[in-house]
Amino acid sequence: MAGKNRLRERNRSKRISRHPGRIFIYERLLLLNLHARAIGEVIKDLTKERALPKNEAAYFGSMVEEARASLSQSVAEIMDAREVHASAIVSRRRLRIEKKLIQSDD
C-alpha cells in the first residue's frame, strides 16, 4: 500500500511542477500586451505623419485593443481554472501533512 501512495504522490507532484509552463504563459500574456501597446504607438505615429487618416487610425486602434482584451480575458479565464486546480491539490497535500504532524504529536 505504501508503494501505491508514493506513486500517487509522485504523479501529483509532476502535475503541480508545471510552474515553468504557467510562467511561460504569463510571460506571453505580458508580451501580447506590450506588443499591442507598441502597435497602438505605431498607429499614432502614422497618424501624426499623415500616413493614416485619423478615423482609420481610431478604427485600427480599436481593433488592436479589442483583440488584446479578448485574448487576455480568454487566457486569464483558463489560467484562473488552472490556478484553482493547483491550489486545491496543494491544499490537500498540506492537510495530509498537518494530519500526519498531529498524529505524530499524540
Image (cartoon, helix red, strand yellow):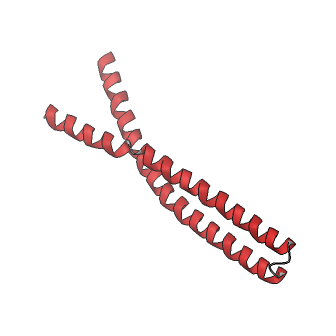
Q: Dividing the picture into quarters, in which one does residue 72 lie?
A: bottom right
Q: Dividing the picture into quarters, in which one does residue 105 lie?
A: top left
Taking the spot 31% from the left edge, 26% from the top edge, the residue there is 100
Is the N terminus in the top left, top right, bottom left or bottom right quadrant?
A: top left
Taking the spot 66% from the left edge, 57% from the top edge, the residue there is 34
Q: Is 29 located above or below residue 20 in the figure?
A: below
- Give the image location of residue 8, x and y in percent: 23, 41
> Along the line of sight, which residue is nearer the eye, 92 or 102?
92
State the count of labels: 0
> Along the line of sight, which residue is nearer the eye, 10 or 29?
29
Taking the spot 35% from the left edge, 29% from the top edge, the residue there is 97
Taking the spot 44% from the left edge, 44% from the top edge, the residue there is 20
Is the C terminus in the top left, top right, bottom left or bottom right quadrant?
A: top left
* 101 left or right of 24 in image: left
Q: Is 32 located above or below residue 20 in the figure?
A: below
> Along the line of sight, which residue is nearer the eye, 16 or 36?
36
